[in-house]
Amino acid sequence: MLRNHYFCILVKRCGFYISYRENEQDRTITMKTKIEKASKKQPKINVITLGCSKNMYDSEVLMGQLRGNQMAVTHESDKIGQDDIVIINTCGFIDNAKQESIDTILQYSELKEKGKVGKIIVTGCLSERYKPELEAEITNVDAYFGTNDLQNLLKTLGADYKYELIGERLLTTPSHFAYFKIAEGCNRPCSFCAIPLMRGKHVSKPVEELVKEAKTLANKGAKELILIAQDLTYYGLDLYGKRNLDELLRHLSDVNGIEWIRLQYAYPSGFPMEILDVMNERENICKYLDMPLQHITDTMLKSMRRGITKQKTMDLVNEIRDKVPNIALRTTLICGYPGETEQDFQEMKSWVEETRFDRLGCFTYSHEEKTHAHTLTDNISQEIKEQRVEEIMEIQQGISLEINQQKIGNTYKVLIDKKEGDFFVGRTEFDSPEVDNEVLIHAGDNYAAVGSFVNVKIDRAEDFDLYGQIVK
């Protein structure tokens, strides 16, 4: 037994490292698969969420079920007692996300060893993907669950899954907006993506169920629904035999109280153009589309198994902009995919400069086991990957500044998200929370209630922020 020092264990087939400190006393840590019911004081359950908005949604559903079982539940609380239960909802998408999840599990494992935390449960994508390895290496976690184990997780906590709570959630976002998951899983064959391994095949939620959920959220004060799925455009194929996102949008648009509906994660191949017609028809559907394109050269798109060519991609972007003037297009790109040549990269840079996306994120390629791309040689160094990301983002920074400067003097409808320091902070319909631009309004000269809509005249612009004054 090793004592009093840090050590690293390479988890085979996982591709990340685990680090933690042993106590001075040798101890035998046994795996517990059942949480005992509290005999005296009911423990507080603290849910920690890592990863994307889809994980956030899952945590909210879990907390809604726990609250429905009369259990005390908090989200990412700093106040944790020795009898409390910590549930860590993990991400297993790429290396950085996996490492963050591992580090978080180890952080709470150490607290448990010191007697500062009662029980630890791990759920989510990392646990779905690497459960046997995690059970073998981090043995003082009380139970591991996957992405579709909600009922079993609740049973372990002594709670019942309440079907009457379907659609009920305990929001972690401000009450005026909510992430709104319309489907689970993915049927796309993208070579670099491990999501189907962790989330399974695409499963759409029925329209009726989603409308009911939207009405519940609206009654609780939600004004903006941010539609999420691994691929929004695939919605309905499994239930209705056709892409049915346009019909769903019309039904959600009719819900009283919902003033903004925002679309995230639309796949370009087979894009259903009819949703653009609905966007033009309905004022409460934001002229905003998040469509990850990943790359642009034919060589890379083919290897990535994206089902689309460079020309078709460019035609699609142009057609979207023609059909919905002033739409804000957001995309994400990958740098350093296996075989990406300098020519591939330069072609992507030129395309970014020419296309002028309103919003753009860029990531380094992560070599994920059990994906199709893992059979390829990861032949580009991390240094070159990061350098290429920096070059793309430097281009986008200039584009964003130019676009923002063109907004000076214009007035926009802004949803106020928070007050931070001397400023009220909000967003236009062209911006999604956390990832896009913000509008800052000096609180000394203006007043706006959080969760309200105000009209703001822009008087100053920076790379990724706008400044303005409220006007009547």
Image (cartoon, rainbow, N blue to C red):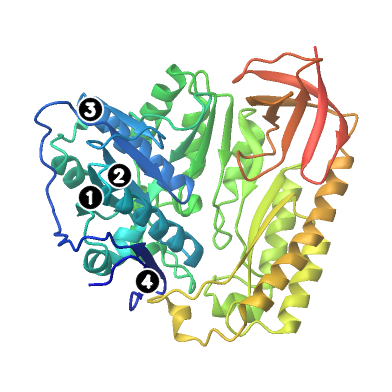
Which residue is denoted by mark 1 in the rendering? 149
Q: Which residue is mark 2?
A: 87
Dot 3: within a 10 Å radius of its alpha carbon, few (fewer than 14), some, or many (20 or more) residues? some
Q: CA distance from mark 1 to mark 3?
A: 19 Å
Q: Which mark is residue 7?
A: 4
Question: Which circle, 3 or 4, is nearer the viewer?
Answer: 4
Q: Is residue 112 above or below residue 261?
A: below
Estimate the x, y position of residue 362 in percent, counting from the top left: 65, 62
Which numbered disc covers residue 71?
3
Label of residue 246 in the image:
none
Would residue 69 be visible to someone looking at this image?
yes
Q: Earlier in the sequence, mark 3 or mark 2?
A: 3
Q: Earlier in the sequence, mark 4 or mark 2?
A: 4
- Indicate the amino acid at tag 3: Met
Alpha-carbon span between mark 4 and mark 2:
25 Å
* Amino acid type of the residue that numbered disc 1 sits on in the rendered structure: Asp
Residue kind at label 2, given as amino acid type: Ile
